[in-house]
Image (cartoon, rainbow, N blue to C red):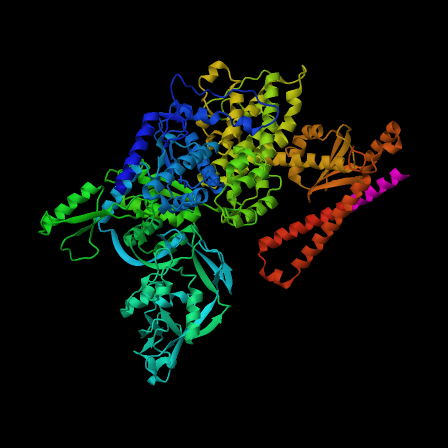
């Protein structure tokens, strides 16, 4: 009946989904019990999602920019591998990736946002590179997590337990939770801009996945890969289920410590070693008792022996003897066991409790000892404890009782309150793990494990970063058989049926794996026939009440998400191209997918495993609901007040103590709440954080700082569109972007055009390489630096005179070329940026498309997301290292000249004579950058004249001139000077025109930096450089330095010292000149 209930409900929902909207474009809720027109939008003529169309607002507002684009992309079918866009109809290259399905236990957190941001960037890059992309979305039923969350909510809201409701009614409650929160998770994924193929959405307990899971179990069972055994398992009394080794957390205490444990009002004592005595049954040995020490004194009632080391001289006379149990008054053996006993620890005597300790269990197996389980599944003592008064009392609560009994009998020997111990806890509930003897289902892992190791070694799969390979090998090399059953109500029912019949020899019965009760009954008949048992024999066939481990169904997803039915027909898109996720589930999920999917298909499920670091808070702490540092990505996107954050905590399932703790932390970390940043800002910031490969310490203030970049980008396009309109520029946006389409010859380009296109070529190469290496932070850095520094910081400043000049003297050809270069830089930059910032790039790109001629628009992609990503080959012809080096020199001269103006309070509007000094023949050559672009330099530094001085040709008069000039050091072989006399002339002119008191002498005058301030700044800089010189000189004369430091570093230090000395000398000169200026002003 249990299995039938699940299947009926799945079939109902599956039917409902397909009845409501088989080709839904706007996804709201695919697994609800209602089907309203507000939830699902059909792709029909009656319901058309229009393309957003709006003018660029004055300022960047992500709440406006991000409206409408996602629905339109989805409506147009851009997300699907069989999308409606003509761009990819002919593509033969496929890219398939499974999105890790988030659990339906609540909302997405910032770690999910990181995963989706990385994956979507990769997906959009592949899509723009011409691949047919299948990015498969889904949600996970999360057995333990979901059941525990719903149980807590049920108890908090209605004071009911699942047992009060019964199994069927409780499962109904869980489905309601799934329908509420599973849909919110989907909305969050959409809000993050994830371009998932929603046509292939799955839930791990929908009919196709359920059928695949059932069939997979049956095949593994029939192949002899699944078996049932009674073993010690990690048991969580709070949840009432077994959990795997990797779901156990450990907490270490070094002394007596009281911890809060779920289900207990009072804190429980740990870090204490209790000592008590076992009286020796035969005192002829000369010993009357054996003292043992234990941290779990309540388990004394399950002791079946005491163990000593066979070589311990203290206890040689006790070999093959017995002791008397101090509380149960029964004899138990003394066994010799060199593996269990450490002679140096405590008394060298160990109590053996095989029913509740893994090491003791192994000892009992070696000595054929009885295995006694004294605990019920809820952590209370059962009848086996042997003391009627303690039956049904909690294991922790009986400790005092047992100690009192031992004391009254004279067997208690005190306790050590400074004992260090590791406490095993359930990662789900926080309860202390109990080793408990339970029958469970297991999968044999040995052969699958070897294949997984081989596939990494022979290159069939790659793990990135590669240092995780060592962890992969270590974990798989020590893997045990996988316990796949859980004692829960929510999950895939174990498709195994227990047969008991009249005259059966075995008390446990027989087990049959089957897809249904009907099929199981057919197996029973066949079994009866094969074993000559009458078909009329009375029998009972009962399905196992356990469910399968959530990771079992998740491990099949590379196959089942592609609609594999659990048979020999492997889906067309298998294996997938890659998997990307956090390294924390490398073994929970990735290794298990690898083992199971390879077993069924013969091929590993993906070719590449890409792992990113765990997200922690700014202090490096693990994000935890109980700490209150879990960040909802929507709070970063849309903004949230501190009051709203507090209310969310109050509405959670946290305890009052945890709520109080969380609110304090939130108030300290976010006193003003979180500023609305938008999706693009969050995504870009998170991807840029991935350069931290081991651990991401997330600071929200850094994410909000990315807004500045978005504002810069927005203003860049506002300026450009304004110039395009004023100069009637028509854009030519095509499927592919390159420079070749508008350049007849490089001779048409100015120096600054050639520079910005060379930098663009370099940026395209870096961005492509970043994606190819899957080091996406290299791509984000490259495109941000290009837009910020090269495009806005340099190119725009150089071309503004050209674009604002409407006189007849302007060279129209130069102006037209400049507009086209600017257009190409803008178009290319947006395409490079789009995988990380899909919304703002689409909005801005469409503003370029709107300027296209109607005939050109016919060949323009509808969206930037289906345009082509810039190719290195289309830009490499523009790469010009000579131009970049020349421009670097020119920019350094311009910056030096401006620095001299600023430090001496000379505005740009007043011309100054400059001197450029160098001892570098290449710089001074007629074809060198200074003379070649002499007029450009003169124009940009507003020079009345420029003298270029060769150090080797200067005479005494030149030396005198330089001595009396303010200087800025660019390098040891390039300096820029301004004669102090020229600065004084301007000051005199200022005196005459404005009155002497108008000269800038204090910081109260907003016209610039005061002479006094400049002098103070120069002195501080001089002192700093002097200290650096002294420290460096002191370091390089040490014997250890001379012996151990590599020659390359020594050479770099020598160059650095020379530069510092030059800077010091120039500063001395500038200080002296500033002092003279100060005296002049005061006179």
**Which of 732/242 is in front?**
242
Q: What predominant SS class does the magenta segment belong to?
A: helix
Farthest residue toward the front? 389
Residue 814 in sight here: no
Residue at (38% x, 71% y) in the render: 350
Q: Is residue 84 left or right of residue 447?
A: right
**Which of 369/595 is in front?**
369
Q: Position of residue 243 (x, y in %)?
A: 36, 52
Residue 693 in sight here: yes
* 392 to 122, vertically: above or below: below
Q: How many marks?
A: 0
Which of the image's four quarters has the N terminus? top left
Residue 1082 forms part of the magenta stretch: yes
Q: Position of residue 169 (x, y in %)?
A: 34, 40
- Bounds of the magenta span? 1068-1083
**Which of 266/286 is in front?**
266
Q: Position of residue 725 (x, y in %)?
A: 59, 17
Q: Position of residue 855 (x, y in %)?
A: 47, 14
Which of the image's four quarters has the C terminus? top right
The image quadrant of residue 730 is top right
* 902 to 361, vertically: above or below: above
Residue 420 forms part of the magenta stretch: no
């Amino acid at each position: 009946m249990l299995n039938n209930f699940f299947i009926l409900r799945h079939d109902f929902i599956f039917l409902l989904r397909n009845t409501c909207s088989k080709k839904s474009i706007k996804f709201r809720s695919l697994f609800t019990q209602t089907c309203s027109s507000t939830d699902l939008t059909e792709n029909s003529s009656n319901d058309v999602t229009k393309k957003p169309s709006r003018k660029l607002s004055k300022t960047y507002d992500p709440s406006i920019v991000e409206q409408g684009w996602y629905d339109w992309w989805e409506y147009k079918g851009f997300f699907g591998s069989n999308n409606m866009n003509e761009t990819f109809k002919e593509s033969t290259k496929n890219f398939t990736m499974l999105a890790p399905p988030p659990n339906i236990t609540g909302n997405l957190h910032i770690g999910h946002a990181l995963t989706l941001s990385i994956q979507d960037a990769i997906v959009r890059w592949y899509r723009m590179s011409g691949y047919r992309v299948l990015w498969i979305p889904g949600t996970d039923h999360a057995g333990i997590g979901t059941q525990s969350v719903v149980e807590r909510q049920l108890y908090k809201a209605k004071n009911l337990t699942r047992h009060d409701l019964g199994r069927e009614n409780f499962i109904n409650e869980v489905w309601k939770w799934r329908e509420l929160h599973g849909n919110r998770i989907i909305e969050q994924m959409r809000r993050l801009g994830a371009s998932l193929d929603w046509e292939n959405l799955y839930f791990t307990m929908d009919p196709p996945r359920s059928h695949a899971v059932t069939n997979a179990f049956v095949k593994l069972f029939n192949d002899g890969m699944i078996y049932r055994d009674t073993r010690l398992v990690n048991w969580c009394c709070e949840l009432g289920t077994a959990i795997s080794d990797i779901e156990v957390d450990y907490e270490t205490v070094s002394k007596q410590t009281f911890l809060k444990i779920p289900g207990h009002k009072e804190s429980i004592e740990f870090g204490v070693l209790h000592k008590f005595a076992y009286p020796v049954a035969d005192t002829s040995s000369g010993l009357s008792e054996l003292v043992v020490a234990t941290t779990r004194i309540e388990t004394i009632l399950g002791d079946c022996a005491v163990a000593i080391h066979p070589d311990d001289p203290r206890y040689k006379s006790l070999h093959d003897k017995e002791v008397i149990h101090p509380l149960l008054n029964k004899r138990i053996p003394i066994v010799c066991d060199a593996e269990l006993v450490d002679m140096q620890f405590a008394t060298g005597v160990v109590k053996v409790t095989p029913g509740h300790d893994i090491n003791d269990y192994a000892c009992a197996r070696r000595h054929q000892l009885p295995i006694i389980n004294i605990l019920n599944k809820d952590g209370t003592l059962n009848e086996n404890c042997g003391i009627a008064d303690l039956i049904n009392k909690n294991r922790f609560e009986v400790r005092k009782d047992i100690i009192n009994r031992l004391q009254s009998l004279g067997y208690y020997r005190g306790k050590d309150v400074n004992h260090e111990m590791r406490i095993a806890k359930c990662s789900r509930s926080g309860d202390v793990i109990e080793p408990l003897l339970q029958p469970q289902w297991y999968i044999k892992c040995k052969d699958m494990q070897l294949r997984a190791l081989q596939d990494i070694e022979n290159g069939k799969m790659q793990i990135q970063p590669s240092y995780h390979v060592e962890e992969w090998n270590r974990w798989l090399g020590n893997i045990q058989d996988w316990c796949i059953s859980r004692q829960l109500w929510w999950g895939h029912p174990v498709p195994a049926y227990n047969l008991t019949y009249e005259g059966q020899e075995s008390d446990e019965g027989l087990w049959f794996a089957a897809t249904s009760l009907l099929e199981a009954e057919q197996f029973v008949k066949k079994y009866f026939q094969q074993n000559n048992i009458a078909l009329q024999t009375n029998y009972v066939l009962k399905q196992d009440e356990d469910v399968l481990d959530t990771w079992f169904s998740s491990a099949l997803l590379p196959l089942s998400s592609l609609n594999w039915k659990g048979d020999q027909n492997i889906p067309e898109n298998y294996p997938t191209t890659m998997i990307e996720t956090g390294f924390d589930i490398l073994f929970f999920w990735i290794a298990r997918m690898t083992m199971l999917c390879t077993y069924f298909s013969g091929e590993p499920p993906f070719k590449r495993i890409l792992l990113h670091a765990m997200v922690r808070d700014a202090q490096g702490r693990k994000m935890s609901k109980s700490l209150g540092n879990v960040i909802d990505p929507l709070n970063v996107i849309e903004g949230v007040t501190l009051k709203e954050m507090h209310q969310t905590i109050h509405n959670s399932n946290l305890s009052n103590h945890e709520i109080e703790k969380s609110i304090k932390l939130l108030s300290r970390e976010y006193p003003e709440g979180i500023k609305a940043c938008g999706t693009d800002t969050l995504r870009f910031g998170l991807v840029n954080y991935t350069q931290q490969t081991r651990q991401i310490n997330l600071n929200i203030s850094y994410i909000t700082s990315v807004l500045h970049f978005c504002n810069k980008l927005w203003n860049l396009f506002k300026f450009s569109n304004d110039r395009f309109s004023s100069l009637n520029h028509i854009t030519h946006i095509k499927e592919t972007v390159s420079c070749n389409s508008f350049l007849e010859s490089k001779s048409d380009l100015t120096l600054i055009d050639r520079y910005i296109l060379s930098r663009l070529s370099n940026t395209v190469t870096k961005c492509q390489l970043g994606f190819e290496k899957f080091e996406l932070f290299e791509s984000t850095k490259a495109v941000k630096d290009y837009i910020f520094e090269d495009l806005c910081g340099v190119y725009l400043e150089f071309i503004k005179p050209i674009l604002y000049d409407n006189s007849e003297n302007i060279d129209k050809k130069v102006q037209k070329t400049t507009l086209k270069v600017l257009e190409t830089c803008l178009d290319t930059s947006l395409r490079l940026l789009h995988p990380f910032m899909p919304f703002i790039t689409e909005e801005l790109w469409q503003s370029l498309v709107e300027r296209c001629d109607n005939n050109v628009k016919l060949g323009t992609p509808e969206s930037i997301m289906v345009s082509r990503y810039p190719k290195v080959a289309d830009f490499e012809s523009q790469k010009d290292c000579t131009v970049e080096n020349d421009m670097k020199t020119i920019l350094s001269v311009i910056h030096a000249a401006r620095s001299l103006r600023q430090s001496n309070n000379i505005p740009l509007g007043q011309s100054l004579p400059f001197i450029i000094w160098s001892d570098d023949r290449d710089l001074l050559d007629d074809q060198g950058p200074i003379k070649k672009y002499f007029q450009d330099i003169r124009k940009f530094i507003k020079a009345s004249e420029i003298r270029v001085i060769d150090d080797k040709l200067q005479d005494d008069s030149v030396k005198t001139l330089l001595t009396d000039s303010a200087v800025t050091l660019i390098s040891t072989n390039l300096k820029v000077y301004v004669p102090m006399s020229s600065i004084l002339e301007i000051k005199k002119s200022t005196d005459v025109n404005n009155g002497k008191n108008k000269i800038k002498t204090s910081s109260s005058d907003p016209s610039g930096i005061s002479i006094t301030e400049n002098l103070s700044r120069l002195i501080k800089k001089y002192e700093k450089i002097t200290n650096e010189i002294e420290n460096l000189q002191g370091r390089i004369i040490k014997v250890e330095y001379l012996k151990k430091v590599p020659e390359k570093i020594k050479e770099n230090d020598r160059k650095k010292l020379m530069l510092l000395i030059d800077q010091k000398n120039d500063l001395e000169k500038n200080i002296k000149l500033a002092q003279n200026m100060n005296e002049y002003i005061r006179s």
